[in-house]
Amino acid sequence: MDDFDGFFDDHYGSTLRAVSVAIGDPGRAEDLTQEAFARAFRKWSTVSKLERPVAWVFVVALNAERKRWRRERNAPEPEPGVSAVPDVASGVLSTIVVRDALARLPTRQRAAVVLRYLGDLTVADIANVMGCAEGTVKATLHHALRNLRVELDGSEP
């Protein structure tokens, strides 16, 4: 994709939604997403040649948030509550029940689920974003899906 404008139009909305759900703060997600796309624009000659440029944008946005998480690790976490940007076109997270279940996941599990299933990133890409081993990502996804199963249908593992 040589045309940045087309790339932006095609991917901004889905990237914003995914980052918003991953971090649980729509306003912060918008800032992160805009900054990530701005960086992609500045490096477009390199980014456009990547196999999945949108994955690069996800990585940049979530790496910025991960740095903030590290700085604030000892600060108390705000009450969980995900307020996703409305998605009329694709119906992602169409029920309050799913949003609430995601919001109740620990931050790391929520980020892994969002990156995998909304961001469509590979386990290797998620490991890069989260700064951990691929095995850790797999274990995190396993625990997150188990927790979601309990939240959504009440079935214990």
Image (spheres, rainbow, N blue to C red):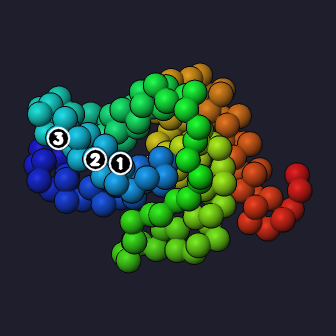
Q: Tell me the mark number nearer the camera, choosing from 3 and 2.
A: 2
Q: Confirm or deny contact between disc 3 and disc 1 (CB under 8 A).
A: no
The tag earlier along the polypeptide, 3 or 2, is 2
Question: The residue under label 3 is which amino acid type?
Answer: Ala
Q: Confirm or deny contact between disc 2 and disc 1 (CB under 8 A).
A: yes
Which element carries disc 3, helix, strand or loop? helix
Quadrant for residue 98, please give it. Answer: bottom right
Rendered residue at 67%/37% (across/down):
140
Residue 149 image position (x, y, % from top left)? 76, 59
- Can residue 120 be seen here? The reply is no
Q: Confirm or deny contact between disc 3 and disc 2 (CB under 8 A).
A: no
Question: The residue under label 1 is which amino acid type?
Answer: Arg
Which element carries disc 1, helix, strand or loop? helix
Question: The residue under label 2 is which amino acid type?
Answer: Asp
Indicate which disc residue 126 carries. none
Structural distance between the alpha carbons of marks 3 and 1: 15 Å
The tag earlier along the polypeptide, 3 or 1, is 1
From the image, tell me which residue sits under label 1: 28
Task: Name above or below for residue 143 compared with residue 96.
Answer: above
From the image, tell me which residue sits under label 3: 38
Which element carries disc 2, helix, strand or loop? helix
Task: Name above or below for residue 102 compared with residue 152.
Answer: above
Rendered residue at 49%/30% (across/down):
72
Structural distance between the alpha carbons of marks 3 and 2: 10 Å
Rendered residue at 11%/53% (across/down):
5
Most foreground residue, 90 or 77: 77
Crowd rating for badge 2 (residues with CA inside 10 Å; few <14, some 14–19, many 20+)? few
Residue 6 image position (x, y, % from top left)? 15, 56
From the image, tell me which residue sits under label 2: 31
Rendered residue at 52%/74% (across/down):
94
